[in-house]
Image (spheres, rainbow, N blue to C red):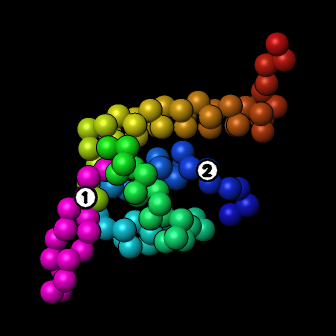
Amino acid sequence: MIFNINAALLDALVLAIVKKEDTYGYEITRVLKNELDVSESTLYPVLRRLQKDDCLEIYDKEYSGRNRRYYKITDRGRKQLDMYRDEWQKYKATITNIFEGVIDDE
């Protein structure tokens, strides 16, 4: 992809994935890598930041004889995701208007 993904957009994408269902870091990376150029080394700091900001909770669950760390969205994370979605709609509309030549000169 030619366009860079900033931190806020990456936060929003991670929250959207985790909102769908509790999941683990590798799975989040796999979902994002299918669509975007995102590495695990980029993702784990995002997960830590979202946890620190009380947008995600973590818990461990046994899988194939070992623990796997799962991420769960919090109420604060849902509110943050709603805000990101609202802002994205405004941003997308603005960019589309500029591309289509519908700009306000005032």
Q: Is residue 63 depicted above or below 42 in this figure?
A: below
Which of the two residues, 43 or 93, is positioned nearer the viewer here?
43
Asked if residue 89 can be seen in this view, the reply is yes
Residue extending farthest top:
106
Quadrant for the N terminus in the image: bottom right
Between 91 and 10, the residue placed more toward the observer is: 10
Is 83 situated above or below 31? above
| Whole-percent x, y for residue 105 in the image | 84, 17
Q: Position of residue 62 (x, y in %)?
A: 15, 77
At a point 20% along the width and 62% down the height, the residue shown is 59
Counting from the top left corner in percent of width and height, residue 94 is at 68, 31
Magenta-colored span:
55-70
Residue 54 painted magenta: no
Q: Secondary structure at mark 1?
A: strand
Residue plotted at (61% across, 50% down)? 6
Extreme-right residue of the structure:
105
Near mark 2 (Cα within 10 A), the count class, few <14, some 14-19 or many ≥20, is few
> Residue 93 sits in which quadrant?
top right
Instruction: Report the side of 88 relative to 46 (left or right).
Output: right
Q: Which mark is residue 58?
A: 1
The amino acid at mark 1 is Ile
Q: Position of residue 7 (x, y in %)?
A: 56, 50
Looking at the figure, which quarter contains the C terminus?
top right
Residue farthest along the front direction in this orientation:
52
**Where residue 6 is drawn, which disc sits there?**
2
Number of the front mark, 1 or 2: 1
Q: Main secondary structure of the magenta part?
A: strand
> Disc 1 or 2, which lies upstream in sequence?
2
Q: Residues within 10 Å of mark 1 (few under 14, many from 20)?
A: some
